[in-house]
């Protein structure tokens, strides 16, 4: 029977309004009463705001703040950057930085936000990250790995794979699920009544059942229950900082206008009715970040691949430069190339090769002069250099010198596959050199995905180029037991 899952997450980010802790308390309380678990992605300044509220800042209700922190501490915690919409946001300050400098800059800029979450929720793991607005960038992934954050959970148009979870840069992603998201018009699914929102769940269950099971998602912002204005649009929309935040929390922000109390109560009641209806269903299971991580393990990492399996990997890689699915495990193009390179680099034929790491893609796209063909020994030497580079840097080399020129990663992957097949089959003669297209690049948007937060015309193609190079690591996440 097809298994269908639905995950709920909240972007908790309105650190300017006095009403935010109350909304956090009310919404987290609904999940707790129903025995459901959600994922709460907090901005660093939101965490600092809640600490100030708990201490009695005179602006927000300390009892609500304490109650919200207690309930979220028993559910799942995520990170949503340090200051969210304050410019420059993630995509702005990473534009033009390249791969390594960009990764370092992200860790430096956003690290204080992670520290704020750990201070508010000591001992609780941060299970996921999501970008502010549409401020996605590929250089965040090395920092997530370094911080031990195993999941990227959000919605954006930059990158996705068949509207289901996938692995990218060694991190599990729930991203670009598109119409498998419960949103409907506006932002509050229950706004038009719990019945219409439940009808959206019906649609998602039907779709995923036809696919053989999978994951849908619903995301909200706690501020959507007390205002129809957007706190960050008022203060930081269109690429402009209309205020300059002060570290002590005394910034004179423009505060969103609240809706009447009776409207707020209607929204909470509609939300509880919707979630009650979801909880009663037998055809869908509500999951949070920790469950998603458990449902979509990476079965390839750390696994030993026998020679017969390596032969299948080589056959698939020689046929297309793409991710591969072998039963219940998947390999990225980078993993497949690295496995074969390790086998080729070994002085003696190996009975099995362990996938001891998942390499990142190259840092830049190179266009070297390639020879028409190479000897088997030259390919094995190049494979050894690839392995050395991966072990030293964690990523594929931009190019590897060979007699008569150099091989870029596509040509190197193709040569490794062909060389392994020749050795396995006892064939002789030179290995022809070709540079196939990296097919996963097609899953990256070409542009126009940045949105209202940025100044007009913001469309950084260098980030999308890095994202395409990153698709060497792209592969589907396979549902446990599917």
Image: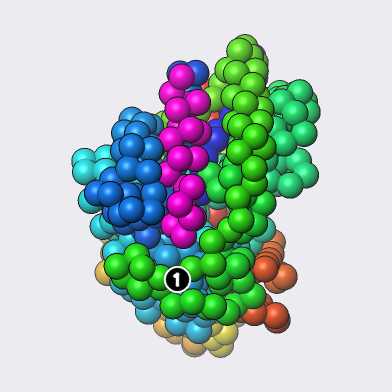
Q: Observer-nearest residue: 404 or 425?
A: 404
Q: Observer-nearest residue: 407 or 8?
A: 8
Picture quarter containing residue 250?
bottom left
Q: Observer-nearest residue: 235 or 147?
A: 235
Q: How many marks?
A: 1
Picture quarter containing residue 440?
bottom right
How is the model colour-coded?
rainbow
Seen in the picture, residue 222 relative to 365 is either above or below; the reply is above
Q: Main secondary structure of the magenta part?
A: helix
Task: State the image coordinates of residue 229 (x, y, percent, origin top left).
Answer: 64, 57
Quarter of the image with the N terminus is top right
Task: State the image coordinates of residue 76 (x, y, percent, origin top left).
Answer: 39, 36
The residue that appears at 32% across and 49% down in the rendered structure is 53
- What is the span of residues highlighted in magenta in the rendered image? 12-33
Identify the element where label 1 is drawn.
Answer: loop
Residue 117, can we see it? no
Residue 120, can we see it? yes
Quarter of the image with the C terminus is top right
The residue that appears at 61% across and 38% down in the rendered structure is 261
Task: State the image coordinates of residue 262 (x, y, percent, origin top left).
Answer: 65, 34
Q: Is residue 36 magenta?
A: no
Task: State the image coordinates of residue 138 (x, y, percent, origin top left).
Answer: 50, 66
The residue that appears at 43% across and 35% down in the rendered structure is 25
Q: Observer-nearest residue: 163 or 189?
A: 189
Q: Residues within 10 Å of mark 1 (few under 14, many from 20)?
A: few
The residue that appears at 71% across and 25% down in the rendered structure is 194
Q: Is residue 93 left or right of residue 47?
A: right
Q: Is residue 26 magenta?
A: yes
Q: Is residue 346 left or right of residue 166?
A: left
Residue on which disc 1 sits: 252
């Amino acid at each position: 029977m097809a298994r269908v899952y639905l995950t709920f997450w909240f972007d908790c980010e309105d650190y300017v309004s006095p009403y935010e802790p109350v909304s956090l308390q009310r919404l987290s309380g609904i999940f707790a009463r129903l025995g459901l678990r959600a994922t709460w992605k907090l901005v660093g300044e939101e965490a600092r705001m809640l600490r100030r509220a708990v201490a009695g800042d005179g602006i927000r209700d300390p009892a609500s703040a304490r109650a919200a922190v207690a309930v979220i501490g028993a559910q799942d915690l995520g990170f949503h950057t340090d200051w969210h919409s304050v410019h420059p946001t993630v995509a702005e300050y990473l534009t033009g930085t390249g791969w390594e400098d960009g990764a370092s800059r992200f860790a430096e800029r956003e690290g204080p936000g992670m520290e704020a979450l750990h201070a508010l929720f000591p001992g609780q793991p941060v299970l996921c990250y999501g970008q502010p607005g549409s401020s996605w960038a590929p250089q965040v992934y090395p920092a997530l790995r370094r911080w031990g954050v195993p999941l990227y959970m959000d919605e954006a148009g930059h990158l996705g794979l068949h509207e289901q979870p996938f692995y990218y840069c060694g991190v599990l992603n729930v991203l670009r699920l598109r119409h498998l998201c419960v949103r409907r018009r506006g932002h509050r699914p229950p706004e038009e009544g719990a019945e219409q929102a439940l009808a959206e769940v019906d649609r998602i269950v039907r779709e995923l059942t036809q696919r053989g099971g999978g994951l849908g998602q619903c995301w909200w912002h706690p501020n959507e229950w007390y205002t129809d204005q957007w706190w960050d649009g008022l203060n930081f929309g269109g690429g402009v900082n209309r205020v300059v935040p002060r570290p002590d929390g005394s910034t004179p922000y423009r505060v969103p206008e609240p809706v009447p109390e009776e409207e707020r109560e209607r929204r909470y009641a509609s939300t509880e009715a919707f979630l009650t209806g979801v909880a009663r269903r037998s055809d869908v299971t509500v999951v949070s970040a920790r469950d998603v991580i458990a449902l979509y393990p990476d079965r390839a990492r750390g696994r030993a691949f026998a020679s017969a399996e390596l032969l299948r990997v080589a056959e698939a890689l020689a046929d297309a430069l793409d991710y591969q699915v072998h039963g219940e495990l998947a390999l990225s193009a980078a993993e497949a190339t690295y496995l074969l390179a390790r086998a080729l680099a070994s002085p003696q034929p190996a009975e099995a090769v362990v996938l001891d790491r998942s390499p990142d893609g190259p840092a830049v796209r190179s266009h070297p002069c390639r020879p028409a063909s190479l000897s088997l020994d030259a390919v094995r030497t190049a494979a050894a250099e690839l392995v050395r580079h991966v072990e030293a840097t964690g990523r594929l080399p931009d190019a590897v010198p060979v007699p008569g020129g150099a091989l870029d990663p596509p040509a190197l992957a193709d040569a490794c596959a062909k060389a392994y097949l020749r050795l396995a089959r006892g064939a002789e003669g030179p290995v022809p050199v070709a540079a196939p297209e990296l097919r996963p690049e097609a899953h990256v948007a070409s542009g126009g995905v940045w949105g209202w937060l940025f100044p007009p015309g913001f469309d950084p193609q260098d980030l999308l180029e890095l994202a395409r190079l990153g698709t060497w690591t792209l592969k589907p996440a396979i549902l446990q037991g599917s």
